Image (cartoon, rainbow, N blue to C red):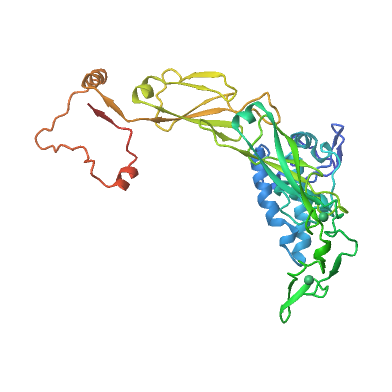
Amino acid sequence: MNRVVSINRTFSTLSHQTCRRFHVSVPTLNKDYYKILGVSRNSSDEDIKKSFRKLAMKNHPDKHTGDSRKEAEEKFKEITQAYEVLSDPQKRQGYDLYGEEGVGQHDHSSQHAEDIFNMFFGGGGRQVRRQNQDVLQQVQFTLEDAYKGTTKTISTTVNTSCSTCNGTGSMKKDGHKTCSMCGGMKFVQVRPGFLQECPGCKGQGTTIDPQHRCIKCHGKKTVPSVNSLQVDIKRGAENGDRILYEGKGDHSDSSLPPGRLFVEMVQASHPLFTRKGDDLVMTKSIDMKESICGASVSFKHLDGRQVDLVSPKGVVIKDQSVLEVEGLGMPLEDRPKRFGKLFIQFTVRDCTLTSEQLDGMKQIFGVVDREAKEGQIEMKPRKETRRKEERTSDGGGNGCKVQ
Ligand SMILES: [Zn+2]
Ligand SMILES: [Zn+2]
């Protein structure tokens, strides 16, 4: 039986079929990556990241034992696969249009899933790769750097195998002797049934004869190696972004490939702007006159150009209200010619009116002075001696007083 398949199909339920009536071949769409990550189809990159972080931690196979481990392993693979596609703008677009067929070949191995996890968490998962340790290093950048894009040179320090002793720690080939503390067992018994790594040889089983100890690494087998690295801060780069450098990590064991180096971006705070995704937020304090009659906002943007803004005519700016301007936010990382929004949050200051100003206002609003008539009780301004917590709790501060 043929079914008519609507273009706005549900991704999770379709299998491969040909719709004869329209001669349209419907691609195999058996996995809904959005559903797997528990996000909506128009969710932001940030939402996808957040959801992946939560689900990947929960379903990591190392957190499960017995029967539930197999299930977690499958789920973990599914989550990382969904994340791999939806976190890549190109793959995501391909998937949105053509489903899994629009994404290309997938690596379905557990190792690949583990690699994605490690890339995301910077080696926080289990180290199953036969290679040296991954290294995480941070690079500081400013909002200006992320607005314009720049390159930073950082110095990285990783351990490499000592070339003087070929990573043995000893200048002589037979300079090692069996550890006297553990007798070469690598472990010592601390109490019946409990073993601990031997402190004498640090679990090596042998120690280096002091007279043959390597003069360069002093028996440590590794030496620190300092390198300089050019880090590309792309336009739109965000706090917490990580760049992966294959083969630039730890290389203590020369018989294994070097580990990976992750450089994490750390954004310094900015005196004027706070970043919220692709948008910028700034605050502006205005007085009551500006609140009623309109306000202007001027500042130097992150690229140094002068920006002058004015509030919309006839709009009263209330305390804590927000106005927005399109295109004055951050450049979008994947489309650097497009920009987010700028939000300006207003606070309206305390103000003091002269008696002439007050009279003028009364005239405009047609207000007649109120005086207590018989039977009416006059309220008094609250005394300033009240307790501090009372002052903060009634949200005061925006009223006006007369000079
Ligand atoms: Zn020992
Ligand atoms: Zn050495």
Q: Quadrant of the N terminus?
A: top right
Spot occupied by residue 299 in the image (x, y as percentages of width and height)? 50, 22
Which of 320 and 135 lies nearest the eye of the viewer? 135
Tell me the quarter of the picture where residue 41 sits: top right
**Residue at point 80%, 74% (across, down):** 180
Query: Which residue appears farthest toward the bottom when viewing the image?
Result: 192
Q: Quadrant of the C terminus?
A: top left
Query: Which residue appears farthest toward the left when viewing the image?
Result: 374
Query: Which residue appears farthest toward the front when viewing the image?
Result: 211
Which of 233 and 13 lies nearest the eye of the viewer? 233
Instruction: Please give left or right for residue 22 compared with residue 273 in the image.
Output: right
Which of 249 and 167 lies nearest the eye of the viewer? 167
Spot occupied by residue 88 in the image (x, y as percentages of width and height)? 75, 37
Q: Where is 264 relative to 315, above or below?
A: below
Query: Which residue appears farthest toward the right when viewing the image?
Result: 173
Q: Where is 15 relative to 363, above or below?
A: below
**Residue at point 34%, 40% (across, down):** 395
**Residue at point 49%, 19% (across, down):** 309
